[in-house]
Amino acid sequence: MAWVLRPKVVGVTIAVLVVAIFVAANAHFFFVAFQSQPDCIEHVKRGEGGEGKFAAASPAC
């Protein structure tokens, strides 16, 4: 008897692969987001701004 792929099995397998890729990609995004820390840049201090200048809400440095 020849091996015949059942449509339901193929569909479930594809769905599982899509979900696994989605979860792995999001896990990578979270990992990169928490591991990277951008350098501090000069910014306007709170209360020292002028027209068109904005201060950081809560600077990390």
Image (cartoon, grey):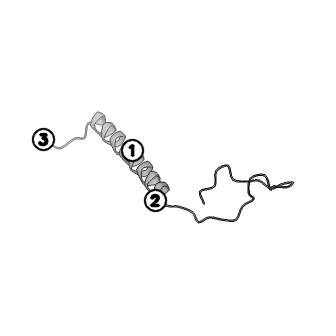
Q: Which mark is residue 18?
A: 1
Specify whether 55 is left or right of 60.
right
Determine which quarter of the picture holds residue 31. bottom left
Closer to us: mark 1 or mark 2? 2
Question: Residue at 38% across / 42% down in the picture?
Answer: 19
Nearest to the observer: residue 50 or residue 33: 50
Label 1 CA crowd tier, 10 Å (few <14, some 14–19, many 20+): few
What residue appears at the point 12 percent right and 41 percent down from the top-left corner? 1
Q: Mark 3: give few (<14), some (14-19) or many (20+) Cα within 10 Å.
A: few
Disc 2 to disc 3, C-alpha distance = 53 Å
Residue identified by numbered label 2: 35
Inspect the image, locate mark 1, and give the three-letter code of the amino acid beneath it. Answer: Val
Percent coordinates x, y for residue 26 in the rendering: 44, 48
| Residue that protrudes farthest toward the front in the picture | 47
Q: What element carries label 2?
A: helix
Residue pointed to by mark 3 = 1
Say which label, 1 or 2, has the lower sequence index.
1
Q: Where is residue 49 in the image (x, y as percent from the top left)?
A: 81, 55
Q: Which of marks 2 and 3 is nearer the N terminus?
A: 3
Q: Residue at x 39, y 44 (%)?
A: 18
